[in-house]
Image (spheres, helix red, strand yellow):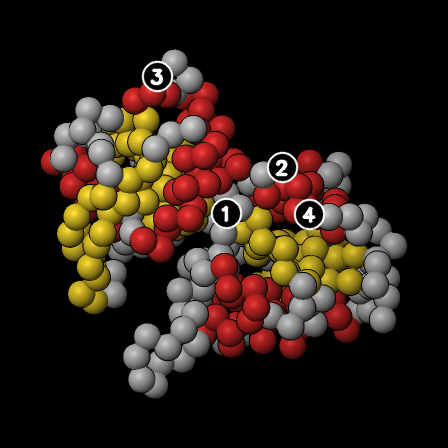
Amino acid sequence: MISHGKNIKIFAANSNPKLAEEIAGKLNLTLGESKVGLFSDGEIFVNIGETVRGSDVFVVQSTSAPVNDNLMEMLIMIDAFKRASAGRITAVMPYFGYARQDRKAKARDPISAKLVADLIAEAGADRVLTMDLHAAQIQGFFNIPVDHLLGVPILAPYFMEKFKDDMDDIVVVSPDFGSVTRARNFAQKLNAPIAIIDKRRPKPNVSEVMNIIGEVKGKKVILVDDMIDTAGTIVHAAQALVDKGATEVYACCTHPVLSGPAIERLEASPIQELVCLNTIELPPEKIMKKTKILSVAPIFAEAIERIYEDVSVSPLFT
């Protein structure tokens, strides 16, 4: 097997072509010629318009909504490159769907994250490049190398600049115990204290705030999470923080899933600004006045360059 392609080629399916084009631009490349569409019966077709024989191919595709369509597009595209004798194929997944189904929460549950990992490898991918997996141990579900980038090194500098004159008033808040490590890393960059919200989730997509561990009275607080889906957790947390005396509430996340009632909840919440990354392309109706979107293109472009040159990706984690 060829372990290193002779040149870089970046292709995009339909989930986030703007991000793919931006990544290619950072590398002084143009997107590879391809077309991904539907047959009349709804089946997906892929047409690669240029040779990829021996090339180092990077397929940029977030498996966001419509999740199954975007996943199948990526799998079929990878298969096409494999059969066209690409030298090495990297699945660049800024957002990895099905990541929340990473364990059996109750009897007879599937572990869908493992199934998706197997499908990606079986399709022909040689490695995966992704960002902020919902559970970091999902890296172990793959039998191929996984480069796992982090969103904190992009989000933290934004708030460092925003609050550079009053950093003493900042508290970083984890909306649940699962995000404590992320919040701690974020707080270390801002040299700020952290607080933790202890919550109970009676059923999927429904959360109930129970207690706040830490001091937030009179402080400007930043809620840090990997994703915001229906926004129930983040909105309840924001209201609880205000009730405890927080003067301003900001929220940030890597993946703005924003499904169901998320926009209505966020609009009506005390959150003053939502800062997110463009791992998922948001339609205009999901971009609020309080939304700030930062680009992941520079870090993904550098990671792609490092993968191509066979040098360490780990410096990007900081």
Amino acid identity at mark 4: Val
Measure how far apart labels 3 and 1 are at the Cα level.
Answer: 30 Å
The answer to whether residue 130 of the structure is visible from this angle is yes
Q: Earlier in the sequence, mark 1 or mark 2?
A: 1
Residue at 79% across, 56% down: 56
Q: Where in the figure is residue 122, as x and y percent of width and height?
A: 65, 77
For label 2, count other residues whose C-alpha is less than 10 Å away and answer few (under 14), some (14-19) or many (20+). some
Report if the CB atoms under discs 2 and 4 are less than 8 Å apart: no
Measure how far apart labels 3 and 4 are at the Cα level.
Answer: 34 Å
Q: Earlier in the sequence, mark 4 or mark 1?
A: 1
Mark 4 or 1: in front is 4
Q: Where in the figure is residue 61, as x and y percent of width and height?
A: 57, 56
Report if the CB atoms under discs 1 and 2 are less than 8 Å apart: no
Q: Mark 1 highlights which residue?
A: 279
Q: Mark 4 highlights which residue?
A: 313
Measure how far apart labels 4 and 1 are at the Cα level.
Answer: 19 Å
Residue 298's label in the rendered image is 2
Measure how far apart labels 1 and 2 are at the Cα level.
Answer: 12 Å
Q: Earlier in the sequence, mark 3 or mark 4?
A: 3
